[in-house]
Amino acid sequence: MRSNQEYFEYLLSCGFSESEAEERMKDREVMRKLYFKKKEPREITSSTYERAQKRLKKDVENFMSGRK
C-alpha cells in the first residue's frame, strides 16, 4: 500500500489539482477506517446455503464411507 505522500504525489501526477487531491486523500482515510473497522461475524441463515451445507456433508460422508 502506498504511503500518504506517495498517494498524494500520484494523484497530482494524474492531473488532479492540489485541492482535488486533498479531497481524495480525505475520502481515502474514510474508506480505510470503514474497511479496517472490526466487524462482528454474521450468521448466514439463507435456506439455499443451509441446503448446500447439508448436501456437502452428505457427499463427504458418502465419500468417507466408500459409497458413491
Image (cartoon, rainbow, N blue to C red):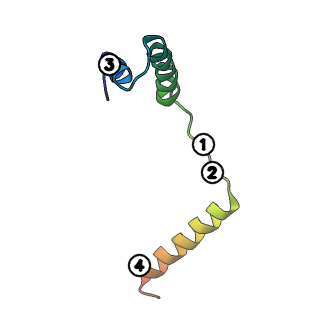
Discs 1/4, front: 1
**Rendered location of residue 41, percent (x, y):** 56, 40
Give the residue number, with chain letter if any, for mark 4.
64
What whole-number distance in Å separates the C-alpha atoms at marks 1 and 2?
6 Å
Sequence-wise, the earlier of marks 3 and 1 is 3
- Name the residue located 48 percent from the left edge and 20 percent from the top edge: 24
In the displayed structure, 63 sits above or below 21; it is: below
What whole-number distance in Å separates the C-alpha atoms at marks 4 and 2?
27 Å
Nearer to the camera, 26 or 46:
26
Give the residue number, with chain letter if any, for mark 2.
44
What whole-number distance in Å separates the C-alpha atoms at marks 2 and 3?
43 Å
Sequence-wise, the earlier of marks 3 and 4 is 3
Discs 3/4, front: 3
Q: Are marks 2 and 3 in contact (CB under 8 Å)?
A: no
- Going by the numbered disc 3, the residue's amino acid type is Glu
Which SS class for mark 3?
A: helix
- Specify the quadrant of the image occupied by residue 53: bottom right
- Going by the numbered disc 2, the residue's amino acid type is Ile
Give the residue number, with chain letter if any, for mark 1.
42
Q: Which corner quadrant holds the N terminus?
A: top left
Q: Which residue lies furthest to the top in this view?
A: 19
**Rendered location of residue 28, percent (x, y):** 47, 23
Left/right of residue 26 with respect to residue 5 in the rendered view:
right
Give the residue number, with chain letter if any, for mark 3.
9
Q: How crowded is mark 3: few (under 14 residues within 10 Å), some or many (20 or more)?
A: some
What whole-number distance in Å separates the C-alpha atoms at marks 1 and 4?
30 Å
What whole-number distance in Å separates the C-alpha atoms at marks 3 and 1?
39 Å
Q: Do the residues labelled 1 and 2 touch (CB within 8 Å)?
A: yes
- Going by the numbered disc 1, the residue's amino acid type is Arg
